[in-house]
């Protein structure tokens, strides 16, 4: 019963928060414009979170997201310029390359994945800021796609594909097996390193898609493109109740529920007119409460 309650906490929190802001913002929260903005704001983080869930399932953390997003945008712009279709394709390609680079450092270099990701994050951010300081990277044509339907279609496609691959193919199932017991998985004949690499590649692909959406939303590329993406994704997944150590407890719904909680809370507090100086304090308190209730502490017992 206790475990069932923990599983229901993120869902209950999402529903409660939606109803709270629906009834306490004089109808502002439920306006069509606000709900559309909410979907567009959350789409970038949710897309990236879907890919990150694959990496977390085999008990790793990817901190490269923001830097990889910026790096993908900059490199794609330098090659494709204003050629929008080519730019989008290159963003995804470079995103996958970033994911494979993290996998290479982790698997062949035997560097913890979070450290490899942090190196890529700082490197990508540095390249983006250096290029942005000397190049005006406007993508005016991308602004024509900045509408609710485009974001919604991309979001639905990514979430559905991610859900199917994660739950109904070997790629997703083996990630959870590796996270549960990597040694036993390897002894059973499964190529652990190969499936880890696939997970990083999937994460890289979603970073590339998130990079495309970021440019569509801002119509430009700057040094701070993708800033805090990794933080937002990891917070969203934690709020969604994902298992930090991976394994069978990892659920794709964490990416969806957690991202919605994250952005609904931020949106609702803004509509309340809460002093910006206190918004982060309220968010931190809510995050701590949610994670404290819903986190699976047995994973730490196994580590100990």
Image (tube, rainbow, N blue to C red):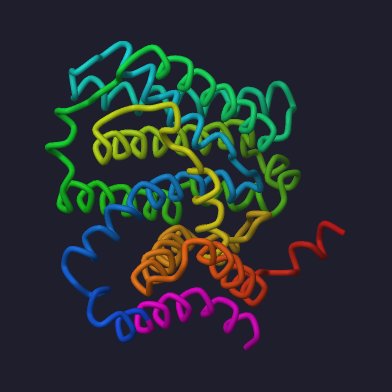
- State the image quarter where residue 264 is shown: bottom left
Q: Position of residue 204 (x, y in %)?
A: 45, 33
Q: Give the residue at x 38% y 27%.
A: 222
Residue 247 position (above or below residue 96) = below
Q: Give the residue at x 29% y 20%.
A: 137
- Asked whether 262 or 151 is in front, the reply is 262
* Outermost residue to the left: 144
- Asked whether 46 or 123 is in front, the reply is 123
Quadrant placement of the C terminus: bottom right
- Per the rendered image, the range of residues in magenta is 1-20
- State the image quarter where residue 194 is shown: top right
Q: Position of residue 302 (x, y in %)?
A: 81, 61
How many numbered marks have been drawn onto this rendered protein structure?
0
Residue 35 position (above or below residue 143) = below
Q: Position of residue 51 (x, y in %)?
A: 45, 44
Q: Give the residue at x 58% y 26%.
A: 120
Residue 4 is one of the magenta-drawn residues: yes
* Outermost residue to the right: 304
Q: Is residue 31 left or right of residue 79?
A: left
Q: Is residue 281 left or right of residue 44?
A: right
Residue 49 position (above or below residue 7) = above
Q: Position of residue 80 (x, y in %)?
A: 25, 14
Quadrant placement of the N terminus: bottom right
Residue 13 is one of the magenta-drawn residues: yes
- State the image quarter where residue 25 is shown: bottom left
């Amino acid at each position: 019963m206790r475990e069932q309650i923990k599983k229901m906490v993120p869902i209950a929190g999402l529903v409660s928060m939606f109803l709270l802001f629906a009834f306490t913002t004089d109808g502002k929260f439920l306006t069509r414009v606000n709900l559309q903005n909410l979907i567009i704001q959350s789409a970038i983080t949710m897309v990236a979170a879907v890919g990150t869930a694959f990496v977390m399932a085999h008990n790793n953390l990817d901190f490269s997201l923001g830097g990889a997003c910026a790096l993908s945008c900059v490199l794609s712009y330098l090659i494709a310029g204003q050629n929008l279709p080519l730019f989008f394709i290159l963003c995804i390609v470079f995103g996958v390359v970033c994911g494979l680079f993290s996998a290479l450092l982790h698997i062949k270099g035997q560097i913890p994945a979070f450290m490899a990701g942090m190196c890529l994050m700082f490197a990508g951010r540095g390249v983006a800021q250096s290029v942005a300081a000397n190049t005006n990277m406007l993508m005016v044509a991308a602004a024509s796609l900045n509408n609710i339907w485009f974001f919604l279609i991309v979001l639905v496609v990514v979430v559905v594909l991610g859900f199917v691959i994660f739950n109904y193919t070997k790629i997703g199932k083996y990630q959870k097996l590796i996270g549960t017991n990597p040694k036993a998985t390897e002894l059973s004949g499964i190529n652990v390193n190969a499936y880890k690499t696939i997970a990083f590649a999937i994460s890289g692909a979603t970073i590339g898609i998130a990079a495309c959406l970021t440019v569509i939303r801002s119509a430009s590329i700057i040094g701070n493109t993708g800033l805090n993406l990794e933080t937002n994704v990891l917070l969203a997944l934690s709020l969604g109740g994902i298992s930090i150590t991976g394994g069978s407890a990892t659920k794709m719904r964490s990416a969806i529920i957690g991202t919605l909680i994250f952005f609904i809370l931020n949106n609702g507090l803004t509509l309340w007119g809460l002093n910006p100086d206190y918004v982060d304090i309220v968010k931190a308190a809510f995050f701590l409460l949610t994670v404290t209730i819903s986190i699976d502490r047995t994973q730490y017992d196994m580590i100990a």
